[in-house]
Image (tube, rainbow, N blue to C red):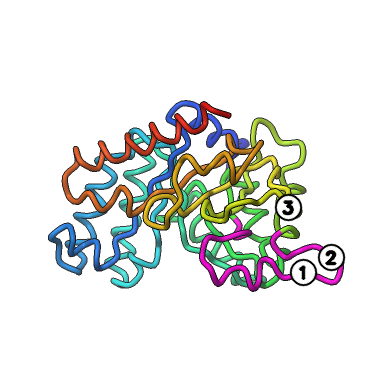
Amino acid sequence: MSGRPVPFGTRLRRAMDTRGPLCVGIDPHASLLAEWGLNDDVAGLERFSRTVVEAVADRVAVLKPQSAFFERFGSRGVAVLETTVAQARAAGALVVMDAKRGDIGSTMAAYAESFLHPDSPLFSDALTVSPYLGYGSLSPAVALARESGTGLFVLALTSNPEGGEVQHAVRADGRSVGATVLGHLAAENAGESPLGSFGAVVGATLGDLSSYDLDINGPLLAPGIGAQGATAADLPAVFGAVVRNVVPNVSRGVLRHGADVVALRDATERFAEEIGTALATV
């Protein structure tokens, strides 16, 4: 790699300030394909993904394809994912690959290379990863992200109810597992400006998080708005002083509006306006 690429955190801050912070998920699961009147096959997958990119990639800060819904179709589905990522980035959206990879050693390095190396067909701006083999297991991904100017979103306080049994568990030193993950991320981002490249996944549905230090000097990817019950108006109460570093994610709330490009754009703009209104009160 020649030269030093612009870090993900810098590019994300610029995109959020220009386009607003909204992230739209691309989650082509079988029920949504059916709602759109599409077959649950590669052709339906391609039509779905192309339509979402056409509708919103030129107007949102971030698109977040969920890798599993492409992988289930095998190599042809992964080929659609490659095209989706390339088209979204060409339209100006940052792509966060939602693959939640987590392993050790050379295997973690290979996962990182799959999504964060510029020569990869799946090269994305950031990748979701799991730290639950120990935060240090992410070291290969952290190193490649720094080298390639990409970022990570590390699962910390997730919106699924089952997450609490691990993330709220208290270690021998008295800190919860989730707080420990946040502390590691704050260390990764120390001294970075305007925003570090190593973010946390923190659910917008979790209510009062004042017992956690969310000021990691990095982005907070916040799933849960829309179908999972959280609203834009909840963001200031959940995230407090760091709410302007939040990347609110909406998937079904936009995607359920179907195969019509205009309807998808209108739904995206409504969520973007609601988020803008909520942030204006802070």
In terms of secondary structure, where does tag 1 sit?
loop
Q: Are marks 2 and 1 in contact (CB under 8 Å)?
A: yes
Boundaries of the magenta span: 154-178
Question: In the image, residue 67 lies at what x, y percent?
Answer: 40, 62
Instruction: State the residue lying farthest toward the right.
Output: 173
Task: Identify whether 105 is placed above or below 84.
Answer: below
Residue type marked 2: Gly
Q: Say which quadrant the C terminus sits in.
A: top right
Q: Mark 1 points at which residue?
A: 170
Nearest to viewer (mark 2 / mark 3):
3
For image coordinates 22% across by 47% down, the residue present is 51
Residue type marked 3: Ser
For image coordinates 51% across by 65% down, the residue present is 160
Q: Say which quadrant the N terminus sits in.
A: top right
Label 3 vs label 1: CA separation? Answer: 13 Å
Q: Are marks 3 and 1 in contact (CB under 8 Å)?
A: no
Question: In the image, residue 185 lies at what x, y percent?
Answer: 71, 51
In terms of secondary structure, where does tag 2 sit?
loop
Question: In the image, residue 149 lies at what x, y percent?
Answer: 59, 43
Task: Identify whether 35 is placed above or below 213.
Answer: below
Q: Name the residue under label 3.
A: 211
Question: How many other residues sit within 10 Å of disc 1, few (<14), some (14-19) or many (≥20)?
Answer: some
Q: Would residue 2 be seen by someone viewing this image from the given angle?
A: no
Q: Would residue 40 be seen by someone viewing this image from the given angle?
A: yes
